[in-house]
Amino acid sequence: MSTTNQMSGGSNVGRRIYRVDPSSALASAWKVAGGIGLLGAVGAAFGFVRAHDRFAYSYLFAFFAVLTLALGFLFFVLIQHLTGAGWSVTVRRLAEFFMSGLVIFPVLAIPLLLSTASLFPWMSHRGAEHGESAPAEEHHSALDFLVRDANAAPPAPPSQPAVPAMRHGGGSKAFAEELEQAEHAEHAEILHGKLGYLNRGFFYTRAVAYFAFWCWISITLFRLSTEQDKTKKLENTVKAQRLAPVATILFGLTLTFAAIDWTMALEPLWYSTMYGVYAFAAGVVAMFALLTLVALAFRRSGLMGNAITAEHFHDLGKLTFGFLIFWAYITFSQFFLVWYSNIPEELTYYHRRWPVHGGAWKVISLALFFVKFVIPFLVLLSRNVKRHTVLLAIGAAIIVVMHVVEMYWVVMPNYASGAFAPNWLDLACLLTVGGLYLAVVLRNMTAHSLIPVGDPRLERAEHFQNA
Amino acid sequence: MSSSMHPRSERPATRQPVLLLAEYSTTSHVVHAAEKVRDAGYSHWDTHTPFPIHGMDSAMGLKDSRIGWIVLVMGVLGLATGLSMYLYMNEFNYPIVVGGKPPGALPAAVPVYFELTVLFSAFGAVFGMLHLNRLPRHNHPIFESDRFRAASDDKFFVSIEACDPKFNLESTRNLLESTHPSAVELIEEKEAHSCSH
């Protein structure tokens, strides 16, 4: 048993104190995580200088994979306050630790924001806001590389004859060229229409706004909660609950636009109206899976005493399971609409990730269905599994690993030719972002109680039962 | 129901015991009573409370409900129905290209597989629940007791049916008396009540 009360004052008289023992391995784990992060950063910095384009994509993948998780934890904390949930009090602090790691993301974003020229082709288009001033011809040349991109992607699928052939029975070559040029102009037109949103100044302004909101809300909620450990004041709970509704709305908006800005805009001709929900679903299901794993690990270590029971794991399992189905529903819906309408501009996204570049992306696409959805679905289906730990941990671990794979699948097909070509920089960047983020999280774990001991609903949460 | 509405009570000679009913005024009493009845090894008995009581499942020694398995089987059946219906119709019976999709393209009918899975599962859940609860049934001897009406208000009950192999009018009554009930009542009927399971 490694709990100790050396670190706290006398305020917790008669109650168990959930603290990380300062002499235990966990207490110095943040240094290990930080060290791994710095080691990764050395590699990433090398990549930044020597292979900047590749670095940009690797870093975006790592950044987005960890950020969606961290935002998932913010969502969890917000929803607990929004609903005034009592059951989750004993696991809420764990989520708050992972939420508190959001403060390092403005720092982690610097390499990303310095690499936008490699990632977003539209960044280099200057004067986009004043479209009228430039003649149409110039736009064509400026946007040429984007349009080429779109045209290189799918000719029509085999079951569907190419458009000119269909219209002109064999068709003249001249007409096909004419048509291609017309499409070319049309694509340029579409892109031009988007440049009011997709331009350098507005992009950076939005990024600053996202980080400002995320840092402010996570710092505030974390402070309200940890302060309550000592003061035991009800008003901290009330304040957090008052913040929750507006913050939840802002969370939805910032996450949606951040997903659009940082990953959907990699392919500016393509769009999906449910992209923000997709990023949300992916982040939240991975968060619930990770929260389950962390809670299982902490209970196993004995640090949590009896505060987290089978009832809590049952609920975490239900939420993981529910959001897994939500993720599958959203992901499939996005694919389904694109696949069914069969319009080349929309198909590019899945075309890149399916037949174009050989087997690997296709295998990952299938794995997202079978490994990320079907297997955990079957594992987590039973009530007994959710209440017993080994299978629950296996199901949750699969989801977390597949989340990282999925984010790789989201970002990487946009790099260069889009071929599947893993690079050591992918790992270096993942270690950088993941390591530094975890260092903040683990550091906070050693500095605060592992359970919100000042929350008035703690007693109820400890004895909570599923009906 | 007033007492004048019990014509059978005028022919006590032909009546047979069907049920022993014990009434409790607190949840902890009824939970402890349930534990005692469970430990005594009864199988045809039940508790009746106005609201769910935490811990009652284990106090009664109830195993997991079989409803989950019924729903699972029905769900798989629904999925199989959706898949085979689509594949048979679209690939073999009347292959037709719609919107450039080859016949038998699986994603096209995913909403159908999904809906049929849900529909069959829901039927399984509702009708399976009715079956496991042996419903619908028109009446139960327990409703002979006026006292029992408080089961949906402020009283808690344990009932042991006479068809239980362990049932013995005297010893079962003694068992119930030992659990601090506020009342114990014997319910009788003209014909012997047969347990249906």
Image: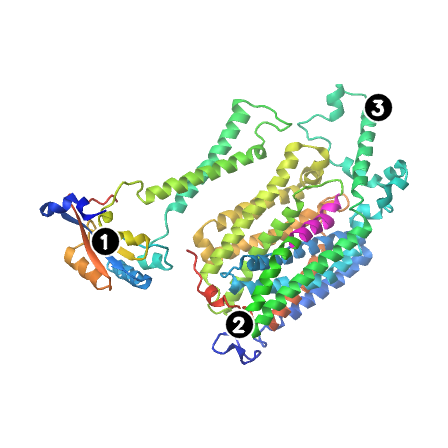
Which residue is nearer to you in this view: A114 or A215? A215
Which residue is nearer to you in this view: B38 or A422? B38
The disc labelled 3 sits on which kind of residue? Ala
Q: Earlier in the sequence, mark 2 or mark 3?
A: 2
The disc labelled 1 sits on which kind of residue? Ile
Spot occupied by residue B24 in the image (x, y as percentages of width and height): 27, 60
Residue at the disc numbered 1: B160
Q: Residues within 10 Å of mark 3 (few under 14, many from 20)?
A: few
Residue at the disc numbered 3: A174
Report the chain holding disc 1. Answer: B
Task: From the image, give the main secondary structure of the stretch colored magenta.
Answer: helix
Q: Magenta region: which residues?
A: A251-267
Q: Which mark is residue A18?
A: 2
The disc labelled 2 sits on which kind of residue? Tyr
Determine the secondary structure under disc 1.
strand
Judge from the rendering whether residue A30 lies leftward or rightward of residue B83; answer left or right.
right
Determine the secondary structure under disc 3.
helix
State the CA–CA distance, disc 2 to disc 3.
77 Å
Spot occupied by residue A394 in the image (x, y as percentages of width and height): 52, 55
Q: Name the image colouring.
A: rainbow
State the CA–CA distance, disc 2 to disc 1.
47 Å
Q: Check chain identity for marks 1 and 3: say if they share one.
A: no
Spot occupied by residue A230 in the image (x, y as percentages of width and height): 57, 74
Judge from the rendering whether residue A287 lies leftward or rightward of residue A411; answer left or right.
left
Determine the secondary structure under disc 2.
loop
In the rendered structure, does residue A264 fall within the stretch colored magenta?
Answer: yes
